[in-house]
Image (tube, grey):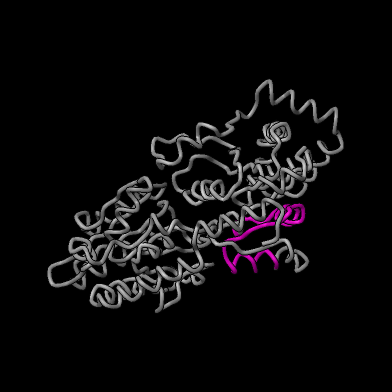
């Protein structure tokens, strides 16, 4: 088991997530890198390996050292037998508690059954490796795994609750929060949801730490450069408004409403080009929608891009739109990192007044907020920005300043590093 001197001097933290390396979860990747720079040794324990051909350039070294495990193997069987024999009460009690807490949720109940054997093996590996703390991203399966490992080994854990992982289903949330050394959530909206669900007595172990962005990587282009200035001189007499939207192509991201808003711009005679960055299950539907609106020359689907590709398109944009909506299956955004990245680049944003987004975007000051699914609102906001370059610049400057104050990746990583070491925030 970890000794207290090691915990205080240099923590050794196991990061857990559902899948790794997931191109859409840049915030997990860059948080781990930043936390290591802040003086924490990181080990990566994904529940599953994400098989992908597109990775951010910083990901391969972390992939090479990640602990990827099958669902079952001879070593996994041995680890389970060891805990059954040496700690039968902890083994069976933890399994039964987790199953009881997730009863009624097919997704969570089956997840416990599926992941429990490999999670028990992870517990043995972490104990043997001297892990001093576990941090899970997302309040769903990864935190359930951290909960199990904690009860088998005594290694303390924490977790970060983001968006859909918290709002879609809350079974076992209170058990997870009660057993955690501390829990992080990325917005005041989420904080209030968790306190309402689990009780005011949890307030001492729950804190808000925003996801952050690298304000050096995401920074405005120099305004003194004429070519850069031309990139952001949108919607003058012969220039199209350059619109970007970053995110998985899924109902919760609301891209269909942006496409409808673009159709309104087209009908109003406002020239534009729209870049959809990301991929997902709704791509075919969205492409059909664009084709039916005769906008295939104006709307481009880029698919998944690396960090550099996203940065390039964001910096070229005149406005980034985040048209998020609550989905039919209960998903909803936290605070989208893509919106933070755009603001860090000094690009004005149009976003939905939803969940924690108003904590990032101050309407009329650091961006423009519209109601979810308000196609006319999105179109009107884009038209206003197309016709008012000074306003775009004011919003962009103010957005950048807010990111520097409240959403800096390095500052947030230092806070996490102190918490992992057992210090107060």
Residue 284 appears left or right of 122: left
Residue 269, how many percent across, how many down? 18, 71
Res 113 quadrant in image: top right
Residue 186 is one of the magenta-drawn residues: yes
Q: Above or below — where is 10 with respect to 373?
A: above
Q: Above or below — where is 413 with respect to 258?
A: above
Please state the extent of the stretch shown in magenta in the rendering: 167-195
Which is nearer the eye, 9 or 40? Answer: 9
Image quadrant occupied by the C terminus:
bottom right
Residue 1, how many percent across, how many down? 77, 37
Residue 202 appears left or right of 208: right
Which is nearer the eye, 321 or 361? Answer: 361
User: In the current view of this chain or complex, which residue is farthest to the left?
Assistant: 238
Which is nearer the eye, 42 or 348? Answer: 42
Residue 109 appears left or right of 357: right
| Residue beneath the point at 69% across and 31% down | 125
| Residue beneath the point at 67% across and 57% down | 183
Q: Above or below — where is 44 with respect to 101?
A: above
| Residue beneath the point at 73% across and 54% down | 181
Q: Above or below — where is 49 with respect to 4?
A: above
| Residue beneath the point at 45% across and 75% down | 362
Residue 139 is one of the magenta-drawn residues: no
Residue 87, how many percent across, how many down? 85, 33
Res 56 quadrant in image: top left
User: In the current view of this chain or complex, which residue is farthest to the top?
Assistant: 74
Residue 305, how many percent across, how many down? 35, 46
């Amino acid at each position: 088991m970890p000794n207290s001197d090691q915990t205080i001097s240099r923590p050794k933290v196991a990061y857990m997530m559902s899948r790794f390396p997931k191109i859409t979860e840049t915030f997990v990747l860059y948080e781990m890198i930043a936390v290591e720079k802040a003086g924490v040794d990181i080990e990566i324990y994904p529940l599953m390996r994400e098989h992908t051909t597109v990775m951010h350039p910083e990901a391969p070294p972390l992939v090479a050292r990640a602990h990827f495990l099958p669902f079952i193997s001879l070593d996994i069987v041995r680890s389970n037998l060891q805990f059954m024999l040496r700690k039968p009460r902890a083994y069976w009690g933890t399994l039964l508690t987790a199953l009881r807490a997730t009863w009624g949720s097919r997704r969570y109940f089956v997840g416990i059954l599926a992941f429990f054997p490999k999670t028990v093996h992870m517990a043995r590996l972490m104990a043997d490796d001297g892990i001093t703390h576990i941090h899970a991203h997302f309040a769903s399966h990864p935190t359930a795994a951290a909960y199990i490992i904690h009860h088998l080994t005594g290694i303390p854990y924490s977790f970060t609750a983001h968006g859909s992982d918290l709002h879609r289903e809350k079974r076992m949330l209170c058990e997870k929060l009660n057993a955690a050394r501390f829990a992080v959530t990325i917005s005041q909206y989420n904080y209030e949801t968790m306190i309402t669900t689990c009780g005011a007595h949890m307030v001492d172990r729950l804190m808000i730490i925003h996801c952050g962005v690298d304000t050096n990587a995401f920074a405005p282009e120099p305004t003194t450069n004429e070519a850069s200035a031309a990139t952001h001189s949108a919607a003058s007499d012969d220039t199209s408004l350059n619109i970007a939207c970053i995110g998985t192509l899924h109902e919760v991201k609301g891209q269909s409403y942006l496409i409808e808003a673009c159709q309104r711009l087209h009908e109003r005679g406002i020239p534009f080009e729209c870049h959809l960055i990301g991929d997902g299950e709704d791509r075919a539907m969205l492409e059909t929608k664009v084709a039916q609106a005769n906008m295939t020359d104006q709307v481009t689907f880029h698919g998944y891009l690396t960090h550099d590709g996203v940065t390039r398109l964001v910096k070229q944009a005149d406005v980034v739109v985040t048209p998020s909506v609550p989905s039919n299956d209960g998903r909803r955004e936290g605070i989208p990192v893509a919106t933070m990245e755009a603001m860090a680049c000094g690009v004005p944003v149009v976003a939905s007044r939803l969940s924690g987004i108003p904590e990032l975007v101050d309407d009329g000051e650091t961006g423009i907020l519209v109601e979810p699914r308000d196609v006319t609102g999105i179109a009107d906001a884009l038209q206003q920005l197309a016709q008012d370059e000074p306003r775009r610049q004011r919003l962009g400057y103010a957005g950048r300043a807010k990111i520097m104050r409240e959403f800096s990746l390095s500052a947030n990583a230092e806070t996490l590093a102190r918490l992992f070491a057992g210090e107060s925030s």
